[in-house]
Amino acid sequence: MTADPRLFACDTTVPIGKTRKAIYINFWVPGIPAPKGSTRAFYVPKLKRAVVTAANKRTKPWEQAIRAEAHAAGCVMLGSVGSSAAGVIIRATFLFPRPKGHFGAKGLKPSAPKRLTKKPDLDKLARALLDALIGIGFLDDSQVDELDVRKRYVELDASEEPGVHVEIEAS
């Protein structure tokens, strides 16, 4: 399926063969990634309706930061393209700071884990990313037909910072 030119206004279009083109964008979002937690609903008699709240207070600002960086990178949804919407590939790497307990007097302890196997859950990080990109990177997250998501600690010798590197490809 070829990408509808109305789907994205992005900074990079990569030719695929003679007729097809892939629309590709990547961007960096600095900050501590926040997972999409559970939501809670409760009835407020005074309002005579249910109110839905997010369990994680950091999720909304994190999603706003993702949207802002996607816009700054030049990715703007140009409108509904209906059934001609392209399939979307998302690649994301979430980077987290190491806890202070991983360090000793001589730097990183040999016993410090190499891989990040603690919370937050990778699927909840991906859910926050996808929800933030709805209407910006794609019409609906059902268009995402490939998802490559990773989480890891920042590399100390590479002067990395916490955040997420996102790549979006539509073809």
Image: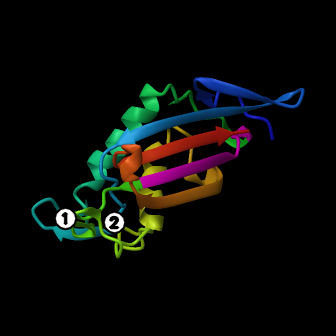
| Amino acid residing under circle 1 | Ala
Residue at (34%, 54%) from the top-left corner? 33
Left or right, 105 with respect to 126, comes to left
Asked if residue 113 shows in the view, the reply is: yes
Q: How many marks?
A: 2
Residue found at the far front of this picture: 106
Label 2 crowd (10 A; few <14 / some 14-19 / many >=20): some
Quote the CA–CA distance across marks 2 and 1: 36 Å
x then y, percent, for residue 41: 26, 69
Crowding near the residue tagged with mark 1, few <14, some 14–19, many ≥20 C-alpha atoms within 10 Å = few
Residue in the foreground of this view, choosing between 64 and 17: 17
In screen coordinates, is 110 left or right of 130?
Answer: left
Disc number at residue 105?
1
In the image, 26 versus 79, the foreground residue is: 26
In the rendered image, residue 86 lying in the magenta stretch gets the answer: yes
Residue at 49% of width from left, 52% of height from top?
Answer: 93
Query: What's under tag 2, amino acid-wise?
Result: Gly
> Which residue, given by chain and number where applicable, does mark 2 sit on?
37
Which residues lie in the magenta part?
A: 84-94
In this picture, is 82 found above or below 12?
A: below
Residue 86 locus on image (x, y percent): 70, 41
Residue 92, position in %: x, y? Answer: 52, 51
Quadrant for the C terminus in the image: top right
Left or right: where does residue 47 sit relative to residue 22?
left
Residue 48 quadrant: bottom left
Q: Earlier in the sequence, mark 2 or mark 1?
A: 2
Residue 5 visible (yes or no): no
Q: Which callout, 2 or 1, points to the residue nearer the camera?
A: 1
Q: In which quarter of the image is residue 28?
A: top left
Looking at the rendered structure, the secondary structure element under dot 1 is loop
Q: Which residue lies furthest to the right in this view?
A: 18
